[in-house]
């Protein structure tokens, strides 16, 4: 709990165990405890990965930098309605995305525009509008027509989010929202085509790439339960980012497995409002008794 959930340093944890509980502990003994718990939750975490890959509703995915043996790595995260899984991998590639999400993902996939997600059908995806806002803001910081296009796109996005807030508050029906978005969709796409033709190469390239994914801009309008942003995955990854900043990643493959498993356990149980300490106690006890650990899945908890 101290190192894997609250992300205290190992030296701080050793001091806490001695000062608060009177339990003397070496750094080596603490590392051995971490690996014992990692092994205890390995099967439930693997089961959670399979569950996310078999989801049919909505899945949010993201990736962020990590370090393993002082080398660049990537920490991947996928979030379904009741399960969150993490995975440390050496690369940021299409193959790595498949390891996380599987080959036959059925859910609507909500991500940024990273090319590794291009292997999934565009009508099965929703692009993150928070990332698009950053692109449009970058347009406004350039000169001439690019800035004009960026300002117009930001204005349309502001209108869209205002209407979406009304849907979430229950003051605008889904049908009313769909009708209100029909002219806005046409205006946004016309502005992107306009941006595709400007002299600024970066703006033109970004608009061209967004238009290639045009259906994925609007999935949230047509399908209930789909959000217009990837904030769910980004919030999940934030805990891992803080861990990385404190520990500089992991120093071995075993350390990476510990990190991804503990992040998975803590995030998933928090989603389901289950007690993390109670679960880790049950899983560790099951390991000692050579019994299966309790599941992380809500229907078999």
Image: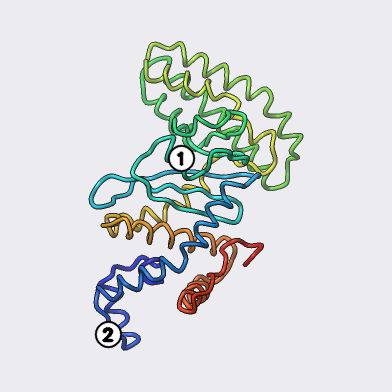
Q: Earlier in the sequence, mark 2 or mark 1?
A: 2
Q: Nearer the viewer, residue 53 or 140?
A: 53
| 17 lies above or below 264 | below
Residue at point 39% right, 67% down?
6
Left-right relation of 184 to 26 = right
Where residue 218 sits, quadrant-wise, is top right
Farthest residue to the front: give it.
Answer: 290
Residue at numbered disc 2: 24
Q: Residue at x 32, y 49 (%)?
A: 66
Q: State which mark lies toward you, 2 or 1.
A: 1
Is the residue marked by circle 2 packed among few (<14), some (14-19), or many (20+) residues within 10 Å? Answer: few
Residue 248 percent across, percent down from the top left? 27, 55
Query: What kind of element bears circle 1?
Result: helix
Q: Residue at x 61, y 33 (%)?
A: 124
Q: Which residue is mark 1?
A: 97
The disc placed on residue 50 is none
Measured from the top left, where is residue 60 in percent x and y? 54, 44
Disc 1: CA contacts within 10 A as few (<14), some (14-19) or many (>=20): many
């Amino acid at each position: 709990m101290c190192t894997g959930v609250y992300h205290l340093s190992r030296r701080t944890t050793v001091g806490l165990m001695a000062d608060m509980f009177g339990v003397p502990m070496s750094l080596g003994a603490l590392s051995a405890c971490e690996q014992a718990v990692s092994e205890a939750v390995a099967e439930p975490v693997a089961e959670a990965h399979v569950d996310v890959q078999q989801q049919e509703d909505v899945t949010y995915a993201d990736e962020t930098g990590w370090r393993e043996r002082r080398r660049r790595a990537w920490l991947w995260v996928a979030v379904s309605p009741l399960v969150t899984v993490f995975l440390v991998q050496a690369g940021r590639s299409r193959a790595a995305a498949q390891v996380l999400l599987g080959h036959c993902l059925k859910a609507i996939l909500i991500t940024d525009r990273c090319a590794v997600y291009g292997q999934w059908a565009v009508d099965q995806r929703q692009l993150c509008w928070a990332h698009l806002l950053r692109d449009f803001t970058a347009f406004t910081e350039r000169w001439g027509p690019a800035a004009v296009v960026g300002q117009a796109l930001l204005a349309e996005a502001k209108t869209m989010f205002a209407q979406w807030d009304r849907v979430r508050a229950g003051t605008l029906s889904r049908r009313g929202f769909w009708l209100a978005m029909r002219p806005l969709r046409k205006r946004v796409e016309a502005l992107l085509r306009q941006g595709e033709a400007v002299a600024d190469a970066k703006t033109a390239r970004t608009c061209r790439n967004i238009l290639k994914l045009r259906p994925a801009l609007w999935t949230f309008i047509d399908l209930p339960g789909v959000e217009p942003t990837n904030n769910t995955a980004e919030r999940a990854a934030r805990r891992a980012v803080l861990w990385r900043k404190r520990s500089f990643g992991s120093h071995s493959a075993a350390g990476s497995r510990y990190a991804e498993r503990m992040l998975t356990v803590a995030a998933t149980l928090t989603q389901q409002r289950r007690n993390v300490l109670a679960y880790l106690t049950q899983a560790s006890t099951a390991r000692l008794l050579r019994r299966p650990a309790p599941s992380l899945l809500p229907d078999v908890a």
